[in-house]
Amino acid sequence: MSGPIRLYMSMSLDGFIAGPDDRTGQELGRGGGRLFNWLDDRDSEGPNGQVFREAMETGAVISGRRTFELAGRWQGDHHDGVPVLVLTHHVDDGDVPPGHTRFVTDPHECVREARAAADDRAVLVHGAGAAQSLLRAGLLDEMEIHLVQVLLGEGRRLFDNLGGRRTELELVRRLDGGDVVHLRYRVHRATEAD
C-alpha cells in the first residue's frame, strides 16, 4: 500500500501562507515568518515536534515551482536525500535542477513518480500552486494545515484557484501545539459548487 499524498502548509487564520511581497530575500513576504514560529519547538516531544518529525519521515516531496525557487531550490535536498518533484507549467532548456530534484509538468505523472519513490511512506506537498493543481486533479489525499493564530490581512492565499469546485474534507486529527493547531484532513472527491 502506498502512503498518502499529503499537503503540509502553515497558514494564517485568514488563509495566507505568506505575507505580501514574497520574493527572493523576503521569501515569506512581509510578516510571513510569523507563520513558522511554531517550528522553534520542533525538537520537543510535544505536538509541534511530532508533526515536524512526521514531515521529515516522508519518502518524497512534491513542490510547486514558486516555492522551490523561493526556497533556494533547497540546494537539491529537502530532507534526507528523498526525491523532490517540482510541479511546473514549463521547463526552460538547460535548466537542470540540483541534487535529487526533477521537474514534472503533468500532475498525474508527478504523483505516480512521487508514490513510487516514497514506497509506503507519505509524500509531502509544499506550495499553493502545487496544492491547487493536485486538488483540481483529484490527486491530493490529505491536508495537514498548521493553523497559526494570526490574521495576516494580505499576502499569498493557499486556496485561491480551485476552479469553482467544492471539496469535502474530513477532520481526522487535531493536535494543539503552542501558538498553532495542527489539523489533518482527509480529502474527499471534489464536486461542482452548488
Image (spheres, rainbow, N blue to C red):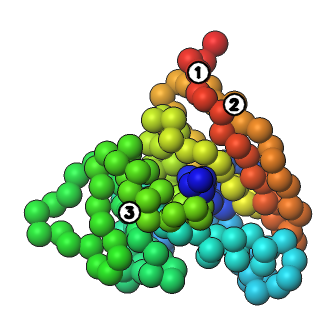
Sort mark 3 into few (<14), some (14-19) or many (20+) by Cα contacts within 10 Å: many
Q: Do the residues labelled 2 and 1 touch (CB within 8 Å)?
A: yes
Label 1 Cα neighbours within 10 Å, binned few <14 / some 14-19 / many ≥20: few
At which x and y percent is residue 65?
36, 59
Residue 168 badge: 2
**Residue for badge 1:** 191
Q: Distance between the residues labelled 2 and 1?
A: 8 Å
Structural distance between the alpha carbons of marks 1 and 3 = 27 Å
Q: Residue at x 57, y 48 (%)?
A: 158
Q: Is residue 152 left or right of residue 160?
A: right
The answer to whether 191 appears left or right of 106 in the picture is: right
| Residue receiving disc 3 | 85
At mark 1, the secondary structure is strand
Q: Earlier in the sequence, mark 1 or mark 3?
A: 3
Q: Earlier in the sequence, mark 2 or mark 1?
A: 2
User: In the figure, 87 relative to 98: above or below?
Assistant: above
- Classify 10 Å Cα crowding around label 2: few (below 14), some (14-19), many (20 and above): few
- Mark 2 and mark 3 lie on one chain; the one further toward the N terminus is 3
Q: Residue furthest front?
A: 1
| Quadrant hosting residue 33 | bottom right
Give me the residue at 74% from left, 81% from top.
Answer: 42
The amino acid at mark 2 is: Glu
- Quadrant the C terminus occupies: top right
